[in-house]
Every structure is written in C-alpha cells, then in structure tokens.
C-alpha cells in the first residue's frame, strides 16, 4: 500500500503538466463560470494550471504569455480579448517550443502554424441561430436594435456577421441602431438608454439583439425603467444562456438565448494532453456545439 502510494505520487508529479492560461477577464456571468470550470477541471486532469486574468486588457495578456514562456510551461492556453496583435508573442512562444492552444475567442494571424488548434463554439452560427429565430418569430418584418460585444473581439465580429447574413435574406428586416456595450450589464443598460432616447421610446422597434445576455439584462433594466415591456413590446434575443437570462425567459422578459457552454474543460484538456503526449497536426478548429433556447 505505502510503496504503491509513494510511486503513484512520484509518477503523477513526474508527468504533471504545467499549463498557463491567459483569460480575457471576468466580465459578465459567462466568463467567471468558464474560468471556474477551467480551474476545477484542471484538477481532474492533474494539470498544474497557472491562471492569469487580464481584466479585459490585451497588454496584460501579452505580459502573461511572456511570463509563461519565461517560466517554461508545457503549453499555453489563450482566450484572446481581441483578434489582432498576436503575431509577435505567438512567434516568441514558437521559438521557445511552447505550443499555443486558443480557446473561446479567435485570433487573426498571418501564420496559422503559430497555434495548434482553437477549441470553441461557432460564434457565426450563434448569430445565425439568433437571426433565424427572429426571422421566424417576426415573420420576416422587424426593425432591430443591436448591442455589440467588445469592439474587435471575435464574438462581436462573428455574431454580427452571422446575424446579418440571415436577416439579409429578409428585405423587411433591418438593424436601425447598433452600439457596443462591451459585453457588460452596465454597458448594455447605457446603450439601451441611448437607443430609447434616439428612437422615441423604441417606437417601431420590434427586437433587441444583444451579443451576450449580460448586455441584454442591462437593456431589460433600462426598458423597464422607461416603462417599456421587454419580451412583449420588443422581442429580446441574445447569446450565452446564463442563469439570469433563464430567469428572464421564465418571467417573459426575454424570448430567446443561444447557449454558450461554460463547462468545457472536459473538451479542452484532453486535446492538449494528447497533443503533449504525441504532438501531431490537429484540425485548426475543434467546434463546441451551440443550441438556441426559448421560454417554452
Ligand atoms: O459570449 C460573453 C463574454 O468570448 C464568446 O465573452 C465569449 C463572450 C461571451 O464576455 O459573455
């Protein structure tokens, strides 16, 4: 018994992988749930996870990644705040022979060999699912206000593109106002307050499309304060499916949300550990499925 325990311990220490994870920040409700899952789930795989929260700042992420390189970690996971500005630091990781794995958000790099793979949901599909739901619900006639996520982030870019691709098929569907609420509840509230003013109390507006639930939750507050009825006067569709939007769906103040899974460590870590055991070319994108939910 004792001998076995000791050798098992030696074994697991010898093979424990040290992985650095540069996370976007802690905006909204989805992100902290994702961080918690990544930290919890690392333990299940015996991974020594070095977690760095960039508080929404790319400079912080660049610093964290360079620190991971200096420490000589076995792999680096990045959830990149914005898509641009990564070529240089990823090149440095490559020179140090540390493999990079992208999770959640995407990058735009000249040389795709700078990272092994990206494991994430399809943000473009999420936008399409939101647009398709709205097209059906409004019978193809709808003036829309849009609350965009963080400017330059992959989900803001792709959710908009996917949504526009679908509503573009319907001549009487149109985005009449759009602004960034930075993926936060406060941001969403401010943006909706501005829309309420600029559209004479959302006169003629049929829907609010928010790139995440937290902005939509802020929008719901703003609308209620203005005496409007979110979910009834205006169709409310967003992305993430966090617990608070599930409540809003039940209360009839939201109408649809596309689920973005947060418990995804079980998809991410096996890919990385397999790669570290036997490095091989992987598909550039490993897609996690998305589902649209409505109140009933
Ligand atoms: O939808 C939002 C978070 O990057 C896809 O980031 C993610 C988004 C998510 O702040 O709530």
Image (tube, grey):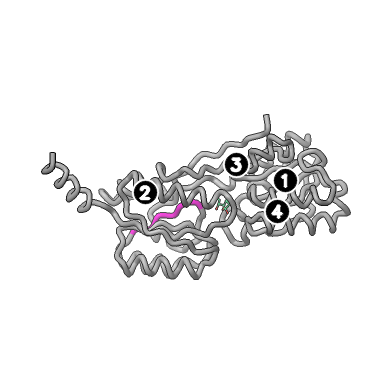
Which is closer to the viewer, label 4 or label 1? 4
Taking the view exactly as shown, the residue that stands out farthest to the left is: 3
Residue 129 location (% of width, % of height): 63, 39
Tell me if residue 101 is in the magenta stretch.
yes
Q: Nearer the viewer, residue 39 or 267?
A: 39
In primary-sequence order, the first of circles 4 and 2 is 2
Query: Marks 1/2: CA distance?
Result: 42 Å
Q: Nearer the viewer, residue 291 or 223?
A: 223
In primary-sequence order, the first of circles 1 and 3 is 1
Q: Residues within 10 Å of mark 3 (few under 14, many from 20)?
A: few
Query: Residue 88 falls in which quadrant of the image?
Result: bottom left
Q: Residues within 10 Å of mark 1 (few under 14, many from 20)?
A: few
Taking the view exactly as shown, the residue that stands out farthest to the top is: 296
Query: Marks 4/1: CA distance?
Result: 18 Å
Tell me if residue 248 is in the magenta stretch.
no
Q: What residue is disc 2 on?
A: 42
Residue 243 marker: 3
Residue beneath the point at 73% across and 51% down: 219
Q: Is residue 166 above or below residue 151?
A: above
Q: Quadrant of the C terminus?
A: top right
Residue beneath the point at 32% across and 45% down: 45
Q: What residue is disc 4 on?
A: 147
Label 3 sits on a secondary structure element that is: helix
């Amino acid at each position: 018994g004792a001998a076995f325990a000791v050798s098992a311990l030696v074994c697991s220490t010898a093979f424990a992988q040290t992985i650095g994870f540069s996370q976007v920040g802690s905006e909204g409700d989805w992100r902290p749930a994702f961080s918690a899952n990544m930290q919890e789930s690392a333990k299940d795989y015996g991974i020594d996870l070095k977690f760095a929260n960039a508080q929404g700042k790319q400079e912080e992420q660049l610093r964290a990644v360079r620190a991971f390189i200096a420490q000589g970690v076995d792999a680096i996971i990045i959830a990149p705040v914005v898509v641009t500005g990564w070529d240089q630091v990823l090149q440095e990781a490559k020179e140090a022979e540390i493999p990079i794995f992208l999770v959640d958000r995407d990058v735009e790099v000249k040389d795709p060999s700078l990272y092994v793979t990206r494991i994430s949901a399809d943000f473009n599909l999420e936008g399409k699912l939101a647009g398709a739901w709205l097209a059906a619900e409004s019978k193809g006639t709808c003036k829309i206000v849009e609350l965009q996520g963080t400017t330059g982030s992959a989900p803001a870019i792709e959710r908009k593109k996917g949504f526009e691709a679908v509503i573009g098929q319907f001549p009487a569907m149109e985005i009449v106002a759009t602004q960034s609420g930075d993926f936060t509840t406060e941001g969403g509230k401010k943006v909706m307050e501005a829309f309420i003013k600029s559209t004479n109390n959302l006169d003629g507006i049929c829907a609010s499309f928010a790139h995440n639930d937290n902005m939509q939750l802020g929008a719901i507050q703003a609308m209620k304060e203005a005496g409007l009825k979110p979910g009834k006067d205006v169709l409310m569709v967003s992305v993430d499916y966090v617990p608070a939007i599930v409540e809003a769906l039940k209360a009839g103040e939201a109408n649809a949300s596309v689920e973005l899974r947060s418990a995804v460590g079980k998809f991410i870590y096996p890919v990385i550990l397999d790669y570290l055991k036997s490095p091989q070319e992987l598909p550039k994108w490993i897609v996690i499925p998305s589902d649209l939910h409505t109140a009933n």
